[in-house]
Amino acid sequence: MESETKSHLTAMETARRYLNAVPNSCQDEDFKEILGLVEKYLNTHCNHNIIEDLIDIDPDRSKMVKYCNLCYKTFN
């Protein structure tokens, strides 16, 4: 059951990435509703495993980020 849930999360995360790649100017209300449903599915079904990581912004600056390493949702 756990691997089945993980494959569902992977499929939804992949769908979210593809949907987010579409420019906002091309997203109608139906499109936005679908994207919202994908986000809702991930928020409801993912048992978030939050990771803190330091990313380089440029050679002189870095930023701390928090994200789930299962669904890749970012947290502030």
Image (cartoon, grey):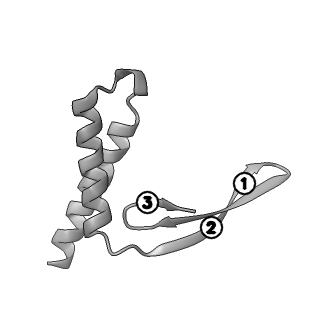
**Label 2–label 3 contact, CB within 8 A:** no
Horizontal and vertical percent position of residue 64: 68, 64
Picture residue at 44% right of the left edge, 67% below the top = 69
Q: Quadrant of the N terminus?
A: bottom left
Horizontal and vertical percent position of residue 74: 50, 59
| Label whose residue precedes the other's in the sequence (2 or 3) | 2
Query: Which residue is labeled 3 in the image?
Result: 72
**Residue, far front:** 29
Horizontal and vertical percent position of residue 32: 29, 36
Amino acid beneath label 3: Tyr
**Label 3–label 1 contact, CB within 8 A:** no
Query: Is 58 or 74 nearer to us in this picture?
Result: 74
Q: Quadrant of the C terminus?
A: bottom right
Point out which mark residue 53 bears. 2
Q: Describe residue 41's horizontal placement relative to residue 22 as left or right.
A: left
Amino acid beneath label 1: Asp
Label 1's element? Answer: strand
Amino acid beneath label 2: Asp
Query: Which residue is labeled 1 in the image?
Result: 56
Q: State whether residue 32 is above or below residue 5.
A: above
Query: Is 55 or 37 nearer to us in this picture?
Result: 37
Label 2's element? Answer: strand
Q: Residues within 10 Å of mark 2 (few under 14, many from 20)?
A: few
Q: Residues within 10 Å of mark 1 (few under 14, many from 20)?
A: few
Q: CA distance from mark 2 to mark 1?
A: 10 Å
